[in-house]
Each structure stands twice: as structure tokens, then as C-alpha cells.
Image: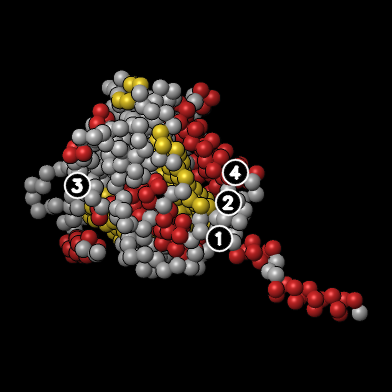
Amino acid sequence: MKTRFIFPILLGLSMVFPSLAQKKNNQKPNIIYILADDLGYGDISIYNPQGDKVATPHIDQLAKEGMRFLDAHSASGVCTPSRYAIMTGQYPFRSKLPVGVLRGYSRSLIEKERVTVASFLKSQGYQTGVVGKWHLGLDWAVKSGFEGNLTQVNYGIQEEMKPENIDFDKDPTGGPAAVGFDYSYILPASLDMPPYCYLENQHLVEKPTAYTDGNKLTSGYTGPFWREGKMAPSFDFYGVMPRFIDKSKEFLVRQKANKPFFLYIPFSGPHTPWVPQNKFKGSSKAGEYGDFVQQVDASVGQLMKTLDSLGLKENTIVIFTSDNGPYWRENFVKEFQHQAAGEWRGMKGDAFEAGHRIPFIVRWPKKVKAKSISNALVSQTSLLATCQQILGQSPSKNDSYGIYPLLTQKNKEIPEQEALVFTTSIGYLVVRQGEWKWVEGLGSGGFTDPRNVKVTNHITGQLFNLKLDPKESENLFEKYPDKVKEMRELLARIKNVE
């Protein structure tokens, strides 16, 4: 009798007051996007099972708990344009800086009216934060009388402001706050570019009143190399990665249980300077670079441990990737017998696969099957559309194609994605469709010699079939003229999309 009366009462209460389980199931997922800097496809052990010079157990574990993509690509072979594409969902050739990278004193690159991942998620009730290397420009305050010196270069490396014309007593505008981030703790650009200082919520933590003469300037941009320039008096190059991890963990601890968050963590490593902490020195068999890669891996492990300790693992999407391929020259491959780019040809900046094929791992315990693998062709421009899909919103009109159906294994490919486009460090455009790849130019287009081969006959580009020739050893330009024409027209059509 008691059961007959109690059950209807409980049922009625459940209709009026949703259960905690229902609330939890309807909760928007947290999103963490970890972006390594110049980390190669073959630097991750699970991507390079033949490699034994570098060990990445924490990143490997992340892959085992989620989905690993084997054909994922950055939108560019270098830093700034890759970050622009991740944040905006737009191919970098559509920006006002179609080629090259910004420096530490450069102006903001992302257009003021542009929807970004951060601004979209903020509009959906997310707390948004970025901790790490920004490299998308800051609008530094200008001293009175120097306003006319704000030159903008729309092609090549952006011309910088002169540091003597900057008023460091005032907070810069632009930057993270202008594109949707509630919280920021950033390094202005790469760790080898001045000014060497941190900004928290647009405010200088310590003014760059000191100066460094640079380090290892003749090393060929390797080892503990950094350029000369202004720096904060207490700035420690070896302490940057640990600082970013500490600040990221502080952000996680501050989050409220009833509000979702998005945390973008662009690491400063293993980009130069290669500055592993003492406890990582000698830990690998690939020199300072390998040691720094292992510190990157340990940093990922620290973040995942913090997530677990806060009870956030189950409802948090963790994405781990790299902004482009590794700066790992052939002499290092021979010296250390380490294939930082795995089986792929070339290195950072190149049109060849090593320039833009990157590790891409997604863990989401609620949705993504553990130990799953995707062979789908995907780009880092996918983040914005994927977030929109997850939250039930219509995708923006841009170059972003969501991967949510891939993550849930509803689809094996992205049907609406006709092709992908990548940009090299010197501006070559590369289009990929299925097994076919077209390079709009001769040479690597990046850091591998020869970079830019002068056209002396009718052969003006490079056509590869990656299924038959994954090492891109044979240019099929003359053998398949109809395919060359088709790929050229495809690229022209994508370029003309507004």
C-alpha cells in the first residue's frame, strides 16, 4: 500500500523538479584546447610506434581514452596564421596577413567584427580563458606624437611598432579581451621574440624595463635561441611553460560548477628556445628538443591530473594538437635518429605533409569512444563549427566544418567539406581533396631547401597522390593534366568564396 502511494508522489516531484542526473546530462560540456607549438606528428609515441628517442606517455594516454585523428592538418605551416584559423574558422589567406607571422609589437590581426570561438562560446554562457602564447597581435598604447607610425603591412611579415614609441604604462587594447576572452594570461608572441613579458587581463604583470642581448643567435634558430630585445627584469625563459601550467590550473580551480568554461592553452614549446627544466634535461634521446617535448608531455599530464582532482573529467572535451609541423632539420634526423615528423616529408612551413599534418586527439568520455581512430580529412579550422554543432547552433559562414559527427562515429567523413586548403610559410596555397594534393608552386614553399623553384617550363605546380605516394616523391603534373586542371579550378573556386 505504501509503495502504491509513494511512487506516484515521486513521479510527480520528478516532473516538477528535474533530477540531478538530468541536470548533469543536460549540462553544456567544458572545452579545453591544448595547442603545442612546433610539435611534430612523429614526436608523439602513439603516432610513431617505431620511434624510441622521445616518450610521451601522458599524451598517449589521452589518445587511448579518446579519438586519434590520422589525417588532421593545421591551416598553415607557421604560427600566427594557424592561430588565426583556429580562433576564427577562416583560412588565413583571407586575413589581412595572408603570409608570414606577427611579432611581439605587431597590431591585432583578428578583425573586430569577426566571430571567434571565444566570442561564440561566451554568448552561449561560457566562461572563457586563454593562458599561453598569444601571437595574434596586441594594440599596444602609443606615446603621444607617434600615432602616425602605426603602419600595417598586408603581405609578408607584419611591420612592427618601435618599442620606444610604446607607452608601457598603459594597457594595450585589442588582444584576447577584444575577441571574447574573459580571462587571459599571455606571452605576446613566440618565446624567441621580444618583448619578453607577461600580460594578465591586458595588464603587464611586470614592465619590460630590462634588456637581453639574445642567446645562441648563430645556432640556426635551434637550441636555447632567442632574439635580443626588451624583457621584464625577472623574466625566466626556462620558467615560461611551468608558469602557463600553474595559471591554467588556477583557472580550472576557479570555475563554478554551474557554468561551463572554455580554456585555450597555447603552449610556448617545443618551439625555440628549447629550454627544458633541469629535471627534464637528458630525459630523452633527442637532445634539448626531445627533452623539451617530454616536458610538454608532462605538462599535459599535470593538466589532466588537475581535471580529475576537480571532478571535471567526464564533462570536459579535451583537444590536444599542434599549430604546425616541427622545426627539425635533416641533420637532426641523422644525428638523433628521431623522425619528428614521422613518415612525412619536409618540416615546419612546408607544402609537404610534415609542414601541416599534425597530431590531433579528442577526449570526451560522455561521447567519444576510447581507443577510437579516425581517418577522416580534418582541419583545425573545424573548432568553431564543432562548438556550434555541439550546442545545437547553425554553423557560421566560413571555412569551418564541424567534426561532431566524426566524434560520435555517426559519420566517417564530413560530407559538406569539398576540400581543405593549407598555406605555406612563403604563401603557397595547397589544396587537398581525397587522396589528391595540389601545390600552387614548385619547391617546398617553406623551410626545406629548395623553398621556391623558379618556373622554367610548363610545369608550374605539384600534384601528388598521397594514397599511392605518401612520401610525395613523384610530381604527377605531366602525367595527369586533367587532374591538374580540376584541382586548380577547385582551389580558385574556394579562394573566391566570400
Secondary structure state at the residue bearing disc 3 = loop
Q: Where is residue 260 shown, x and y percent of the image?
A: 55, 55
Residue 438, visible in the rendered structure? yes
Query: Residue 154: which numbered mark, if any?
Result: 3
- Choose between 456 and 161: the one closer to the eye: 161
CA separation, marks 3 and 4? Answer: 41 Å
**Residue in the picture at 68% in, 63% down:** 21
CA separation, marks 1 and 4? Answer: 18 Å
Q: Residues within 10 Å of mark 1 (few under 14, many from 20)?
A: some
Of labels 3 and 2, earlier in sequence is 2
Q: Where is residue 172 shown, x and y percent of the image?
A: 34, 39
Residue 159 in the figure: left or right of residue 41: left
Disc 2 designates what residue? 65
Q: Residue furthest left?
A: 456
Residue 197 in the figure: left or right of residue 456: right
Secondary structure state at the residue bearing disc 1 = loop
Of labels 3 and 1, earlier in sequence is 1
Which callout, 1 or 2, points to the residue nearer the camera?
1
Q: Classify 261 as above or below 35.
A: below
Q: Where is residue 120 shown, x and y percent of the image?
A: 43, 59
Secondary structure state at the residue bearing disc 2 = loop
Q: Where is residue 294 shown, x and y percent of the image?
A: 50, 33
Q: Residue furthest top?
A: 213
Disc 1 designates what residue? 28
CA separation, marks 3 and 2? Answer: 43 Å
Q: Which quadrant does the C terminus fall into?
A: bottom left
Query: Residue 253: which numbered mark, if any?
Result: 4
Q: Amino acid at mark 3?
A: Asn
**Residue in the picture at 16% in, 56% down:** 478
